[in-house]
């Protein structure tokens, strides 16, 4: 199967996720639930999307595996696994903010090979083929995106993490040292931070505690756009955990200097 | 002039701001500037919008005043002042994130009476008439929005602030005490946090160090949607400074308990 065909199928999955996600966005929230009748829209959206995507995958690619947040892993019989986070940024979702993402990646023995990051409310879709190319579309034709060029130093960098309070101990020390040097800090983005890095807005994303499905879809898009994404030791990050993405190898190396002592 | 006519003119101002803002969004950033040829897209957008809006106001309402971020105040001859922040969320703007806002309010002797919060990239427009009603439109007809109902305690609340690192001393102590109790914390939003409160997504926004143009447009939208917005003493906040907005009077009171000792 060519990457082009696989990416088209990944987009078909993202198309199927859109109406399910939007059905639950900005509707009744946990606070509206009646006593004894708990209604959690993000859980309903998460489960509904993953169920639908698993069904499409097993109908069309029965030997492919699926690794998702909501259900047990279906082990691949052909080395190809779809890695899915139905709604990344659940806190943004419940707060009515349009920065959550549907994350879909196809991994093979070389790691995540291609992916889609989809924001259904804005109608933005990021796609990528690892170390090759990345695109952004808003309904029309996809346009190539690239990381910002020429940012090699921390004091020129726009830095993002989801919540600085999620770092503890050595991690917090390392992050604070980098944050003090960065030109601009942005918080609260989850997946959207990596998308913004790929389109040339953000230069450096630092996170920890990620699951495989929180990071798989970022790898093809960040590397396809010319960026670098690894764990805090500089190795592959598809397993999740501590992740750092940068718009240039020099900036990545500058961040690793601080992050390496905090690796687990 | 009726509120309806004034709000229509405020929307005309927001319409005029849109193409100017979008012309500079996600284009060359400071990092692309050639040495000696500094190009700052957010400053260009800020100045271009404010100039255009001042011109429209003086052509159509020559006796109205204008208070904006970029130029000196034009003092009103009739008690009516337009309060403008051309791009609120400049760090989001330069990072390519779609959560910046164009803020336009009309104040009279009673304070900000009506306003528009516009997000041109998403195409979302929030409008409000103080203590009366608030609406959200995305191209089509405006729909009434309301704050979330029934959140009265900090431990049920979704809390937002732009950057917790902006609080120092007593302010940081007060904010941390509230943040530890909140159900969910969201960072990085600037004006979008108040818009999300008005539409029922976020329950509590706490900030300090705001300028008059950072807050004026929030007052009609938050109170129009049924929320409460004051300074940390519980008084009017149109002057800026320390601001707290809440989805219920009970939640507002619970937050003030912690914030009052940190008032300046």
Image: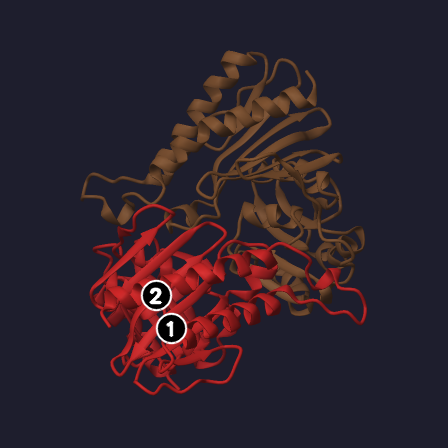
Chain colours: A brown, B red
The N terminus of chain A lies in which quarter of the figure?
A: top right
State whether residue B139 is above or below residue B194.
above
According to the picture, the residue beneath numbered tag 2 turns out to be B9
State whether residue B119 is above or below residue A121.
below
**In the image, farthest residue toward the front:** B59
According to the picture, the residue beneath numbered tag 1 turns out to be B60
At horizontal 34% and vertical 77% (from top left) the residue drawn is B259
Between B252 and B173, the one nearer to me in the picture: B252
> Where residue A36 sits: x, y (%)?
19, 40
> Where residue B158 sits: x, y (%)?
35, 57
SS assignment at label 1: helix
At horizontal 30% and vertical 81% (from top left) the residue drawn is B233
Q: Is the C-beta separation of discs 2 and 1 under 8 Å?
A: yes
Can residue B173 be seen here? The reply is: no
What is the tally of numbered marks visible in this picture? 2
Q: CA distance from mark 2 to mark 1?
A: 9 Å
SS assignment at label 2: helix
At horizontal 34% and vertical 71% (from top left) the residue drawn is B244
Circle 2 marks a residue in which chain? B
Q: Are marks 2 and 1 on the same chain?
A: yes
At horizontal 32% and vertical 62% (from top left) the residue drawn is B8
Circle 1 marks a residue in which chain? B
> Where residue A150 sits: x, y (%)?
78, 57
């Amino acid at each position: 199967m060519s990457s082009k065909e696989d990416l088209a199928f990944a987009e078909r999955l993202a198309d199927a996720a859109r109406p399910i996600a939007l059905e639950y966005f900005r509707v009744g929230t946990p606070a509206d639930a009646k006593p004894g009748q708990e209604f959690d829209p993000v859980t309903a959206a998460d489960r509904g999307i993953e169920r639908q995507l698993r069904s499409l995958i097993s109908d069309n690619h029965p030997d492919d595996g699926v690794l998702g947040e909501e259900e047990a892993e279906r082990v691949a019989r052909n080395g190809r696994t779809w890695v899915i986070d139905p709604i990344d940024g659940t806190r943004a979702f419940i707060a009515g903010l349009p920065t959550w993402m549907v994350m879909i990646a196809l991994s093979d023995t070389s790691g995540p090979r291609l992916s889609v990051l989809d924001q259904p409310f804005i109608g933005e879709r990021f796609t990528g083929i690892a170390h090759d190319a990345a695109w952004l579309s808003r309904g029309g034709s996809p346009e190539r995106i690239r990381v910002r060029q020429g940012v090699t130093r921390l004091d020129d960098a726009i830095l993002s993490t989801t919540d600085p309070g999620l770092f503890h101990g050595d991690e917090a020390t390392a992050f604070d040292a980098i944050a003090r040097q960065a030109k601009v800090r942005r918080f609260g983005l989850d997946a959207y931070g990596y998308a913004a890095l790929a389109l040339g807005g953000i230069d450096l994303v630092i996170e920890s505690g990620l699951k495989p499905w929180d990071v798989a879809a970022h790898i093809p898009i960040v590397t396809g756009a010319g960026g670098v994404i690894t764990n805090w030791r500089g190795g592959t990050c598809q397993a999740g955990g501590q992740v750092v993405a940068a718009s240039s190898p020099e900036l990545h190396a500058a961040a690793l200097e601080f992050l390496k002592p905090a690796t687990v």
